[in-house]
Image (cartoon, grey):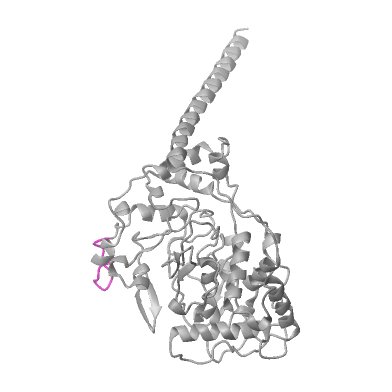
Amino acid sequence: MRAGLVLLVFLLTLAVTNIASHYVAQGREAALDSKLQKVVDLYRLSPLSIRRYEADPKWKLGQALFFDPILSGDRDVSCATCHLLQNGLSDGLPRSIGTDGEGVGPDRKLLKGIQVHPRHALDLWNRDNNSVSAFFWDGHVEVLDSRKRLFRSPLGTALPTGFQNAMAVQAVFPITISDEMLGYYGEHSSKTLPANQANKRNELVLSTSYSSEIAKMQSVHTLLLNRLLAIDSKPEPWQSEYRSMFRRAYPRKTVSEMNIVDVGNAIAHFEELAFASTDSAWDRYIGGDQHAISEQAKVGALVFYGEGRCAACHTGPLFSDFKYHGVGIFSKIYVNGQYVNDLGRGGVTGNPRENYEFRTSPLRNVTKFGPYFHDGSTPSLYDAIVRHLEPLAKVGTYNPDGSFFIERDQADSVSPILATGIKLSKEQIQALIAFLSTLDSQSRSRDQIVPARVPSGIPISY
């Protein structure tokens, strides 16, 4: 009898304790929701909206061009080579390997030469959003006047008119860069490709030298259109297929009137519809569903918008101000046979006060597209946050040759937001990562995005 009474008391105590714990937890989470509502109101946060998906003729052309290795000099890489869904639309490598490589994603290896590509491949999520004003880490393609559709680009004043947005402009430059897609003079495509594409000379590169970089880019663009559409000759069957796709996408133009602008606009149209991300857990939460994210993620959101100071730069619907900041990440790039400091934005503008500044990375799907920073030097998101918090940790440290690990001008380039130091605990960083994971979302399925084949007949590696 006494044993039964003791057991009953124990069970009642346990039940009361669980009920009390439940209400304590409820009260704690309600307090978090109340604080976050103030954040939502202060920052005027609202769920991300995206355009309706429609696989129209222009979309289908852009899809083919994005995935078809025929756009590269040696017919060995495509846009998709460095922008993989499984790697968050990056490639999982610290620095990308374009032409002269083999393999997919993190397993891709350079077959010859040295690694000269300077930076980590950027993701492509939601780049049609109105908040996007700059492309590439240093903004060498950016919007100057959206109403007049004026853009900064490597072509300068020679940029053709008619590009619909900056995304279309950026799409036509990787095909002009030797270590990305263009390749080199005198090279030939692999003998293992389908017969109609095997052992073909890289006719996109006419010379080992050009009168200028602009002349080189213009030449490549013209030759690429001729390769795709056989403008000056009788088309092969695969070229006839591309002719038909271009005509359907641009019904008011003849084949001879097509140009590189049409290529860029089609690729951009595909990218902006295919690579949209909405209805993430965070979108649902700020839309009113308080159960959409965990308590830990709510704590992380308060750190993000509060003492972590993340929202000072990672702001707006895509969590980027699309401006340039020094965050204490310094690297070397290979230029004209030697390694030099990567000046980032300063290398574009020529303004030394902008040296070592790089564009704020958007954060939707950030958990997927590591390694992190412009040089891909940090494998994990946790370590990337730690490096943000301690950008000057190695000031005063020496290299083996006696030079400073961080030079004075590099230390001075670090944003004042970070330079003063931000102290977060391990638990706060883990909560921050839990919040960032609520930004993960892929609105289109893989079957909608990846084509079964491309007109050239070259196999898709994806």
Residue 188 is at least partly visible in this image: yes
Rendered location of residue 113, percent (x, y): 49, 83
* Residue at screen point 61% across, 90% down: 201
Image quarter hosting the C terminus: bottom right
Rendered location of residue 317, percent (x, y): 50, 50
Residue 17 versus residue 409 in the image, above or below: above
Residue 78 is at least partly visible in this image: no
Residue 430 versus residue 92 in the image, above or below: above
Secondary structure mostly seen in magenta is: loop
Q: Is residue 393 left or right of residue 35?
A: left
Q: Which residues are magenta?
A: 395-406
Residue 164 placement: quadrant: bottom right
Q: Nearer the viewer, residue 440 or 15?
A: 440
Q: Is residue 77 left or right of residue 246?
A: left
Image quarter hosting the N terminus: top right
Q: Is residue 397 magenta?
A: yes
Residue 19 versus residue 98 in the image, above or below: above
* Residue at screen point 55% across, 49% down: 48
Q: Nearer the viewer, residue 176 or 111?
A: 176
Residue 80 placement: quadrant: bottom right
Q: Is residue 70 left or right of residue 404?
A: right
Q: Is residue 132 magenta?
A: no
Rendered location of residue 114, percent (x, y): 46, 80
